[in-house]
Each structure stands twice: as C-alpha cells, then as structure tokens.
Image: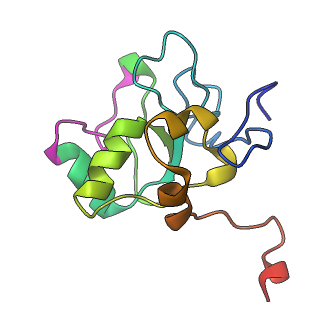
C-alpha cells in the first residue's frame, strides 16, 4: 500500500503491478505527484484492443523504451495509465478494465467513479468468495 494515498473507493491505494513495474515513479503504484502532469492514476488491465487504440492516438505502449524504464506491454499486464488517455479509449469503445483498489483518487478529477466502476476488474484475493 502506498503510504497515505487513497484509491477511488476511499480505501488505501493498493499495488497496481510489480511485474511489469508500473507507476509514474516506477514503484508499482498509480500515485500522482507534482511531477506527473499526465496523472498516471488509472490501474488498467490492458487488452489488445486498448493497446491498439493507444498506439493509433500516438501513445505506443507496445514498444519497449528502456530510457524510460518502460518494458512494453502485452495484453493482461496491469499498468498505470494516464486518466485522459483511458477516457479517450472509453470514448472510442476500447477502454481497458480497471482495478479500482489500485486506481488513485485523483483519477476522479478526470473520470467519474460510476464510469470507472462499469469497467471494474477487481477480484478478491480468494475468488471462491464470489461463488
């Protein structure tokens, strides 16, 4: 958990991904500090459709960029994405599922909670509790 950071549900911000290591600060969390002008606050489970849409609008998330400590993504990876970019994908019909517990509350400055909830991909640690 990121110390003192909150998620869109009002709880402690949870880890988005350690493999690949995500976040603006590459600490695994979708935190939003003053240096992060893009607000990399939405923890998305990227899909092929989402990745292709992002590439079509000039945001290539497929190609590794070592100089930015960016490994390149494959479908199924969890990644902290820029809130406005995720919203653009939603508007184009290709938004990725969202892990609400790992999505920073500052995402709500851009995307309404109800919209994020409609893409929720959160699964409890014990999936048998869903039965």
Query: Which coloring applies here?
Result: rainbow
> Whole-percent x and y of residue 59?
24, 36
Left or right: where 40 falls relative to 14: left
Residue 85 higher or lower than 117, as above or below: above
Residues drawn in magenta: 56-66
Left or right: where 90 falls relative to 77: left
Q: Residue furthest top?
A: 35
The quadrant in which the C terminus is found is bottom right
Q: Residue at x 29, y 52 (%)?
A: 89
Is residue 65 within the magenta segment?
yes
Quarter holding residue 95: bottom left
Quarter holding residue 61: top left
Left or right: where 74 falls relative to 44: left
> Whole-percent x and y of residue 62?
30, 44
Residue 4 higher or lower than 90, as above or below: above
> Whole-percent x and y of residue 1?
80, 35
Left or right: where 74 falls relative to 78: left
Q: Residue at x 52, y 37 (%)?
A: 107
Quarter holding residue 83: top left
Tell me which secondary structure the magenta stretch mostly adopts. loop
Is residue 73 within the magenta segment?
no
Residue 129 higher or lower than 31, as above or below: below
């Amino acid at each position: 958990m990121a110390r003192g950071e909150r998620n869109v549900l009002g709880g402690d911000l949870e880890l988005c991904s350690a493999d690949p290591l995500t976040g603006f600060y590459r600490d695994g969390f979708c935190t939003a500090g003053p240096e992060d002008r893009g607000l990399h606050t939405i923890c998305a489970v990227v899909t092929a459709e989402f990745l292709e849409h992002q590439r079509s609008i000039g945001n290539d998330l497929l190609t590794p960029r070592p100089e930015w400590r960016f490994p390149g993504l494959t479908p199924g990876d969890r990644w902290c994405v820029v809130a406005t970019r995720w919203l653009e994908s939603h508007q184009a019909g290709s938004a990725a599922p969202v892990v609400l517990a790992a999505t920073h509350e500052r995402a709500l400055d851009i995307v309404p909670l109800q919209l994020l909830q409609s893409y929720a991909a959160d699964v409890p640690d014990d999936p048998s509790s869903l039965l």
